[in-house]
Every structure is written in structure tokens, then in C-alpha cells.
Amino acid sequence: MQKAQLSAWKRMMSKFFSPKFRALTPYTPGEQPKDGQYVKLNTNESPFAPSQKAQAAAGEALATLQLYPDPECRALREKMAGILGVKPEQIIFTNGSDEVLNFAFMAFCDSDTPAAFADITYGFYPVFAQLNSVPYTTIPLAEDFSIDVEDYIGLQKTIFIANPNAPTGKVLDLAKIEQIAAANPDNVVVIDEAYIDFGGKSAVGLIEKYKNLLVTGTFSKSRSAAGARLGFGVADEALIADLNTIRYSTNPYNVNALTMALGLGILEDESYTKENCAAIIKNRSYTTERLRALGFEVIESAANFVFAKTDAIGGKALYERLKAKNILVRHFEKERIREYNRITIGTMEQMQQLLQAIEEILAEVTL
Ligand code: PMP
């Protein structure tokens, strides 16, 4: 939802709209142009289509769409449990990981238990907090955008940490996550692992030991299925039971039958996912090196994007000039990060197009 659309909705607000939502500022997703005109490096999607096998599995599900999907997502949970080395009862599937994150705000936060997250992190956390009338505090990241574990000891708040973080791509090592989980035994610690397959170490192995740990993941990035909307949460059975109470009170059929079949097909083709991740990691190293050679400061990334800035041109100006050359990246008009752009890592060809456009822009601005 773009800024202009947001103000239009605010202007149109009806007298029936509940006062509790009147000040709500919705999340602004990245631009999703549909004319195919752009090299799209702005929303961290995979540049690779779902595998043929996965597509065929979704196709087969068309023939039984007269039936509701399995609200328990049994086949998908069993398959995923085998891959992650957990029990099916320790997994919940949702409509994108945004949904499990929202469920976590609903289930584990309220005015007595506020939320806490970094000042620079996924922009949906404050929106979910507002939506659910949850007070929240933001904890400033260090100058280099790293997390200081000392800031997260005994907070008495529900903690949300994106690992790797967005939009910086910085990863927190598992020992530090363990320290945070151990130091907040009376609160839920949510580790949002949307980008974990591109270089981080998953905290899923810690859920047996830390009953307060909820790890969330998505099929939108490494698994090439952003359009299908499939996310999940992994935690102790009791936390998953709470999330299911919320899910069954919202929409038990939150994962549709096509997505369920596609998801199963994707999990049956793990080698395809792994190959794609390896390609993204290789293209990320190449892009990072080239951008640095062009004078950019590029944060070391463990995700499928890089966060970069240069003294040669401001963040917004670079975003605009790239857009004029039909390349979309993500710029955040936000304190501390407005000089940066977040660039999704795509195919090598897309990266070459980006780098060539950047070279042209730098030549224009340094004339
Ligand atoms: N967490 C983070 C850190 C993200 O960047 C995103 C993608 N916008 C999500 C969660 C949600 O992704 P999805 O709902 O597509 O699973």
C-alpha cells in the first residue's frame, strides 16, 4: 500500500470505523508493479520459479477445490517436522509468516506484557503492535546495526528479533539467541527467520530446551513461493497450542488447498531449494564485492539482499535514478537508514543490470 493510497483511505475514513483503529498506520509493502517493466529487486522475492514438481503438485490440487483444505495441515506439518527434526505438534502453518507473527502479538502480548524489538528491523512489528493495542518499546541497535545482548536481559517483555535482521541483513549468532532466551524465561522470545536459509544458523534446535522460544519461517524467500503465502512457526507444543487457539478463532482454513499442495511439493524437492540458495549466496558475494569496488559501504549480509550506501549519491536519489532506469530497489524514508538502499539479490543477469545502471548513475553524478 503506497503513501498516496494510505492518505486516500485516511481521508475516506467512515464514521463507522472503530476509534481504536483510527490512528493505525498500516504497513507499506514494497511496490508490486504488474507490467513486467522493472528488474524487481525491492521485495526480497526469489528470482527462481517454484520447481516443476511443486507446480505440478499444486496443479493436481485444482481438481479437489470443492473441498475445504485440511485445517490441521497434517501432511505439511509431518513433512516439515521430518526436515526440521521436531514433532508435528511443534509446528503451525499460516498464511505467510506475517500471519504467525500477528498471532504471536495477539497471543503473547498485552498491556501487561508489552513487546520489544530493535529500532531498525522489520517494519511490520510496530504495525502488529498497534493493531492489537500492544504497547511496545524499540531498542536501538549499535552504530554498526548489531544487537547488544545486554539490552535484552530480563526485559519482562515479549521480544521480537529478525535473524538475519531486515533490512540490514546482519546475522546474530546462535549463542547470543540462546543467551536472550535463557535470560527471559517468563517471556516469549520470537526469532523471525524469514531469511535464515541464506547464511544464518536456525534456532529451531533450541526449542526443546527453551519453552519460551518461537521460531518463525517462510516459504516466500528461499522456497520461491511468495505468491502462495505460506509461513510457519516452530516452538514447544504449548506455545503452538496457544497460536492454534488464535488461528481457530480467526480462520481455521488460513492455508488454502493450492498452497498446501504447493508447499508439500516444495518440501519434496529440498535439493532445488538448496541449489537456489547457493546461487543467491554466490550472487550476493559478487554484488557485495562489485558495489564495494564502486565505493559503496555494504553491510555483510546473511540474507537474500544487501544494504548499501555511498557518499557519491543520497539513498533516495539513487532509488529514484535506478527506478528511472527500470530497476526497483527498496528505500526506507527512516532515520538512521535513509542514506541506504536495500537491494534484493536476484539472478547474475539481474545483478549485472543493476551494477551497470549504478555505474552509469555514478558517472552522471560525478561529472
Ligand atoms: N519477516 C521478515 C523479516 C520479512 O522481511 C518478511 C517479508 N516481508 C516477513 C517476515 C513476512 O514474509 P511472508 O509473510 O511473506 O512470509
Image (spheres, rainbow, N blue to C red):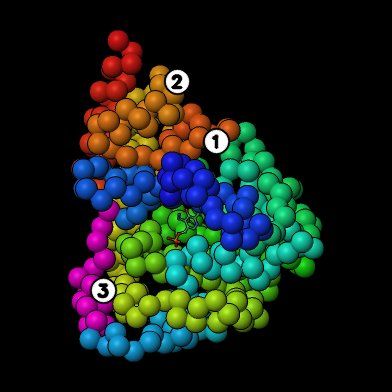
Q: Which residues are magenta?
A: 47-62
Q: Residues within 10 Å of mark 3 (few under 14, many from 20)?
A: many
Q: Quadrant of residue 292?
A: top left
x and y, in percent, of residue 97 in the image: 48, 65
Q: Which residue is mark 1?
A: 334
In the image, residue 128 sits, relative to residue 360, either above or below, namely below
Using the image as rendered, state which of residue 35 and residue 336 is in the foreground.
35
**Is tag 2's residue or tag 3's residue first in the polypeptide sequence?**
3
CA–CA distance in space, label 2 to label 1? 18 Å
Residue at image point 30% right, 10% down: 367
Residue at image point 22% right, 86% down: 63
Q: In the visual, does 238 lie left or right of 83? A: right
Q: Amino acid at mark 1?
A: Lys
Q: Which residue is mark 2?
A: 311
Residue at image point 63% right, 61% down: 18
In the image, residue 142 sits, relative to residue 105, either above or below, namely above
Indicate which label's residue lies in the foreground, 3 or 1.
1
**Is tag 2's residue or tag 1's residue first in the polypeptide sequence?**
2
Q: Amino acid at mark 3?
A: Ala
* Magenta run includes residue 51: yes
Q: Residues within 10 Å of mark 2 (few under 14, many from 20)?
A: few
